[in-house]
Image (cartoon, rainbow, N blue to C red):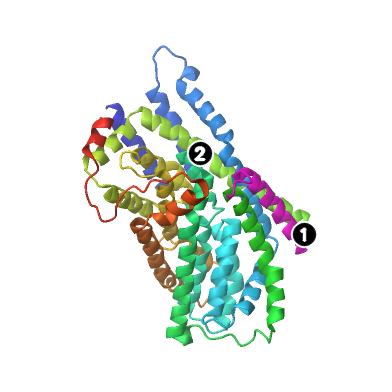
């Protein structure tokens, strides 16, 4: 059996094992070491002198020494401490009061709350669960349609995947070796475009069929000044924290790690201001931060070892030759890559897709003249569908776990479908107008992000490119 065949066997066996439910990080490590021992085996060596053990040690050190990853635990801590500050109910209530004159005001308030809170935490399950406890019963009590209410919460809870400071973008930056700052700038327009589409959809549905979103009758009579005070107390502090973190990164005042550290401190201050800070909540936040950060680091170590052995055996070259041999255009390559990631999003978490499978496509980006920043934003948009598309729509399962008994899982699924359509529409618009991704990085940093293709040009990639890689 040749080495490339062994590499493909290694990849296929890994996919089978993870579908059986084995822990992914440790499966990567075990298979990387096992197949690596075969790849580096020399008959005259003792067992522990095999180079795979040196490779594994070096990969572990490299991952733990990666400066980009420092910001992950800090942003996670900021999110967890804010989550435990009990400000979500105040935020939702103040937005209901401030937006009460809009059609579908409660759903719009829920979307804005989800967007802000998802941006602050970046943790889909936490946002969907908390909003399911706070906003869903309130909307159902007001007579809102079950499908619309469920769709608003499940879709809004996934926005933290795309809108900075997204943990996904940090992990992608570390994997692809690109600038986190440029990724953050590139994600802003697509992120807010998606939020705007969600809000416009809800308002349009409410105007066309007011029975879907009746005006709430039990909010009380608040003056304009009282509404402003409520917004200042609940909305402004959290928004100011997020904008200060993002602003300091985008305007070059701080590195992502420094901004994340200040954000973590700001989260503690915010919890103290809202009188929600306690030793118990601090301990829980630190524990959850450590657990999630360790999971990401173990995935990086396992994926680095697995991919190194896979490449050494020739698996990466086989895949590259196969895809380039198909004579795909740039557009066709992007569609194939996004379809693959969309399918992988059903059984796998985004972290596993970014760390394990995205590196398979990264060596092909220069071949098809695709900028890795644009590719990363397309992935971030695409992966939201994995949380919303049945049968493995995790946002729907998170919501079902806390929803009233009368809200059926299939009802939640049906509520997700229109929002999946809007995510796919955003993905299409990003394909057709890549400037939505490239404009802000160009504006802030003055170094153009290359637009890889003309959407109206279906020509095949320059054949000279193929000669250069043979």
Q: In this figure, which residue is indicated by the disc labeled 2? A: 300
Dot 2 lies on which element?
Answer: helix
Q: Quadrant of the C terminus?
A: top left
Quadrant in the picture for residue 388 = bottom left
Mark closest to the chain's N terminus, 1 or 2: 1
Find residue 183 and report its horizontal and vertical position in percent.
49, 48
Most common secondary structure along the magenta stretch: helix
- Specify few, some or many for label 2: CA neighbours under 10 Å numbering under 14, 14-19, or 20 or more: many
In the image, residue 130 sits, relative to residue 446, either above or below, namely: below
In the rendered structure, does residue 89 fall within the stretch colored magenta? Answer: no
Find residue 184 and report its horizontal and vertical position in percent.
52, 51
Q: Residue at x 54, y 46 (%)?
A: 181
Q: Residue at x 47, y 83 (%)?
A: 212
Label drawn at residue 112: none
Mark nearest the camera among 1 and 2 is: 1
Marker count (numbered): 2
In the image, residue 62 sits, relative to residue 387, either above or below, namely: above
Label drawn at residue 272: 1
Magenta part of the protein: which range? 251-277
Q: CA distance from mark 1 to mark 2?
A: 35 Å
Dot 1 lies on which element?
Answer: helix
């Amino acid at each position: 059996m040749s080495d490339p065949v062994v590499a493909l066997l290694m990849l296929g066996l890994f996919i089978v094992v993870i579908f059986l439910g084995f822990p992914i990080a440790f499966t990567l490590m075990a298979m990387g070491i096992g197949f690596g021992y075969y790849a580096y085996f020399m008959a005259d060596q003792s067992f522990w002198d095999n180079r795979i053990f040196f490779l594994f040690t070096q990969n572990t050190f490299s991952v733990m020494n990666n400066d980009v990853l420092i910001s992950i635990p800090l942003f996670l801590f900021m999110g967890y401490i804010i989550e435990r500050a009990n400000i979500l109910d105040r935020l939702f209530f103040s937005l209901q009061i401030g937006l009460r004159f809009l059609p579908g005001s409660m759903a719009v308030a829920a979307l804005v709350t989800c967007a802000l809170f998802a941006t602050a935490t970046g943790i889909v399950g936490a946002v969907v669960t908390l909003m399911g406890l706070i906003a869903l019963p309130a909307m159902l009590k007001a007579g809102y349609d079950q499908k619309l209410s469920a769709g608003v919460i499940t879709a809004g809870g996934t926005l933290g995947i795309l809108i900075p400071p997204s943990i996904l973008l940090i992990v992608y930056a570390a994997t692809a070796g690109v600038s986190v700052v440029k990724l953050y700038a590139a994600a802003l327009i697509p992120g807010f475009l998606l939020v705007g589409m969600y809000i416009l959809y809800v308002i349009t549905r409410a105007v066309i069929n007011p029975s879907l979103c009746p005006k709430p009758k039990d909010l009380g009579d608040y003056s304009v000044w009282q509404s402003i005070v409520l917004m200042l107390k609940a909305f402004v502090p959290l928004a100011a924290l997020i904008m200060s973190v993002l602003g300091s990164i985008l305007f070059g005042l701080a590195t992502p790690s420094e901004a994340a550290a200040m954000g973590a401190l700001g989260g503690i201050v915010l919890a103290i201001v809202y009188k929600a800070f306690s030793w118990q909540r601090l301990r829980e936040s630190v524990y959850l931060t450590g657990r999630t950060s360790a999971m990401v680091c173990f995935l990086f170590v396992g994926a680095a070892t697995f991919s190194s052995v896979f490449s050494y055996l020739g698996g990466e070259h086989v895949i590259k030759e196969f895809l380039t041999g198909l004579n795909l255009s740039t557009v066709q390559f992007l569609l194939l890559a996004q379809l693959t990631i969309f399918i992988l999003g059903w059984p796998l978490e985004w972290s596993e897709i970014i760390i394990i499978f995205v590196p398979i496509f990264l060596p092909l980006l220069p071949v098809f003249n695709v900028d890795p920043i644009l590719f990363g934003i397309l992935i971030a948009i695409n992966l939201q569908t994995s949380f919303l598309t049945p049968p493995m729509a995790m946002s729907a399962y998170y919501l079902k776990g806390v929803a009233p008994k009368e809200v059926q899982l299939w009802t939640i699924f049906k509520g997700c479908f229109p929002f999946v359509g809007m995510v796919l529409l955003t993905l299409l618009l990003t394909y057709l107008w890549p400037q939505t991704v490239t404009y802000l990085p160009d504006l802030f940093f003055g170094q153009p992000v290359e637009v890889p293709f003309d959407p109206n040009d279906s020509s095949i990639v320059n054949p000279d490119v193929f000669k250069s890689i043979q």
